[in-house]
Amino acid sequence: MPLDAWRTVTAEEADRLTAELQREIGAGHVLAGRRATVVRRCSGCDDVIFRVDDDAFAVVHLTWSGREESQPWPRTVTLPSFLALESYVDSHQH
Ligand SMILES: [Zn+2]
């Protein structure tokens, strides 16, 4: 699945996704304390690609519980570069 099969989101949706991410990640989570902004969202499974601290990416499956989750939730795959993201997205299937 190429990256352009993942849809872009509105500013409002991006705010909602980012706020939920911040609610769900606990102190021990890999994204704790890092700045995350929404890049795209999978229309098939709702995974969200976040850009992390300007130089990395993460694909997160939010739980939508609205509260802090225990490890390893929300399920997150961190990717150190855009190339790693492209490779991950290419092999993404449902
Ligand atoms: Zn998906």
Image (cartoon, helix red, strand yellow):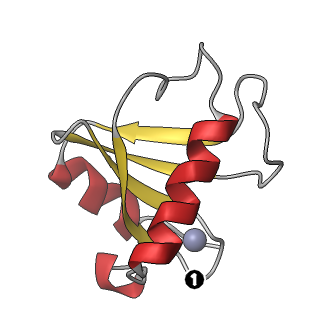
Query: Label 1 belongs to which residue?
Result: 43
* Left or right: 89 as drawn, with respect to 48: left
Give the residue furthest to the right. Answer: 65
**What residue sits 65% from the left and 73% below the top?**
94
Q: Position of residue 28 (x, y in %)?
A: 60, 13
Q: Position of residue 73 (x, y in %)?
A: 71, 34
Q: Position of residue 84 (x, y in %)?
A: 25, 48
**What residue sits 57% from the left and 63% below the top?**
16
Callout 1: few (<14), some (14-19), or many (20+) C-alpha neighbours within 10 Å? few
**What residue sits 78% from the left and 24% below the top?**
70
Q: Pick whichever, 14 or 85, lies toward us.
A: 14
Please name the amino acid that badge 1 sits on. Answer: Ser
Please tell me whether residue 82 is drawn above or below residue 52 in the rendered image. below
Looking at the rendering, the quadrant in which ligand 1 lies is: bottom right
Mark 1 C-beta to ligand 1 under 8 Å:
yes
* Left or right: 44 as drawn, with respect to 38: right
**What residue sits 39% from the left and 86% below the top?**
5
**Quarter of the picture holding the N terminus:** bottom left
Q: Pick whichever, 10 or 86, lies toward us.
A: 10
Q: Position of residue 30 (x, y in %)?
A: 49, 23
Number of marks in picture: 1
Which secondary structure lies at badge 1?
loop
* Left or right: 13 as drawn, with respect to 50: right
Please tell me whether residue 60 is drawn above or below residue 35 in the rendered image. below
Q: Pick whichever, 93 or 34, lies toward us.
A: 34
